[in-house]
Image (cartoon, coloured by chain):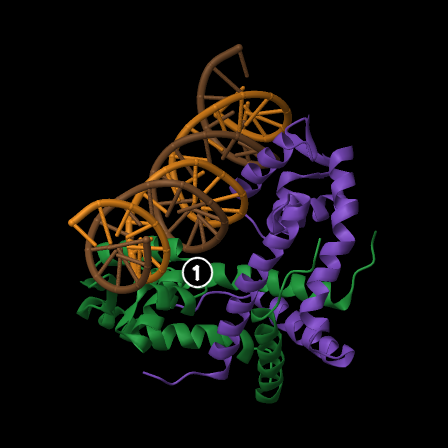
Chain colours: A purple, B green, C orange, D brown
Amino acid sequence: MRNNTIGSLIWLRLMRFTTQSNQLSNEFLKRFDLTTAQFDVLMQISIYQPLTQSELAEKVTVTQGGISRMLVRLEKEGYIVRKQDWKTKTISLTEKGEAVLEQAFPEQLAFQSSFFDEVLSEEEQKTLYSLMTRVHKNSQKKELPPV
Amino acid sequence: MRNNTIGSLIWLRLMRFTTQSNQLSNEFLKRFDLTTAQFDVLMQISIYQPLTQSELAEKVTVTQGGISRMLVRLEKEGYIVRKQDWKTKTISLTEKGEAVLEQAFPEQLAFQSSFFDEVLSEEEQKTLYSLMTRVHKNSQKKELPPV
DNA sequence: TATTATCACTTTACTACTCAAGTGATAATA
DNA sequence: TATTATCACTTGAGTAGTAAAGTGATAATA
C-alpha cells in the first residue's frame, strides 16, 4: 500500500502546516481577544464594507449558515453591526471593530509573514506564492471525478 | 491599512486552498462513507499500528481530547478496536477498517495528487514540496513573539 | 500502610464549520 | 386577490477541533 505520490506528500504538508499555523495564530491573537477566523472575517469586512452576508460568505469560503453564526457572535461582541435593508442585511464595522483591527492588523501581518521570512528568501517566497496561486485557482474550478 | 506583505499573501492562499480542497475531499470521500479527518486517522493507524492514543494524536496534530472523540466514532462504526493494556489503550484496524482503506487509499491519493498534477510540472511540484517542507518544519519549532 | 504524584484517557463547555430544513418578506403569476 | 416562487438569512443536527477539569489505575514517598 505504501506508494505515495509527490502530490499526496505536498497535500499532507499543506494540511499539517495550516492546522499548525492556525493554532499558533489563535494563540497569538488571544492578546486581542480574537480568533483567526474572526480576524479573517473582520479584515474582509473592513476591505469591502458595506456588504451583504452572502458576499462575505463567498469571500471567506464559508457557507451561509456558517457566516450567520459567526456574525451573531461578532455582533454580540460589538465589533460589527447589521442593518436590515429590504431583505438584505448590510454589514459594517463598529468603532470598536475598527479599533481592534487597527491594533491587530500590523501585528498579525508580521506574525503571518514570519512563518515564511524565517526560512525563505524573497525570491523563494515569490516562487511559492505563484505556485500556490496556480494550485488554488485550479481548485476553485475543480469538479469531482465520477464514481 | 492596505499594506500586505508577500508572506501574508501566501498565508491567505494556503488557508483558502486548504479549506477549499478539504471540502472537495470530504465530498469525494462520501462514496466511502468517510470524512477527510477519518481517512487521515485511519491511514496513520494502518501505518503505525498497534499504537497508543497519545502517539496517534501527535501524528495527526490533534489534542488528546480530539483524538478521544474521533476514536469513539471510528470504533462505533467498526473501523478500529481499542484494547486496554495496563493504562494504555492500544489501537488497531478491524477487518472492516482494513477493507475500507484498501478501497479508498488509491482513489484518495489520486484525488489529492490531481490538485497539483493538473497545473504543475513534476519539477514545480518538487520545488513546492521542498519549500513547504522547510516552512512546515520551521513552524513546528516556532515560538510565540512576546506581548 | 496512607498519601500523593503521575499518567493515559475522558468529559465538559466552547468555537467553527457542514448540510438541509425552516422563516418571513417581496415579487410573479393564476 | 390568492397562491406560489424566490431570496437572504436563521436554525437544528452533526462533525471536528480546542482548553481545562475530571477519573481511575499504577508508582513513589512519608
Q: Is there any visible trace of residue B79 in the rendered image?
A: no
Q: Is residue D26 left or right of residue A34?
A: left
Q: Is residue C27 left or right of residue A96?
A: left
Up-down: is A63 above or below A3?
above
Q: Is residue A128 above or below residue A49?
A: below
Is B42 left, or right, of C22 in this rendering?
left
Pointer 1: what residue?
Answer: B62
- Depth check: C9 or A125 in front? C9
In the depicted view, which residue is nearer to us: A101 or C5? C5
Residue B43 screen position, x and y as percent: 34, 72
When the figure is inspected, residue A65 is found, relative to residue B67, above or below; the finding is above
Residue B97 percent coordinates (x, y): 24, 67
Q: Is residue A71 visible?
A: yes
In the displayed structure, B71 sits above or below B49; it is above
Q: Looking at the rendering, which quadrant does residue B52 occupy?
A: bottom left
Q: Chain of mark 1?
A: B
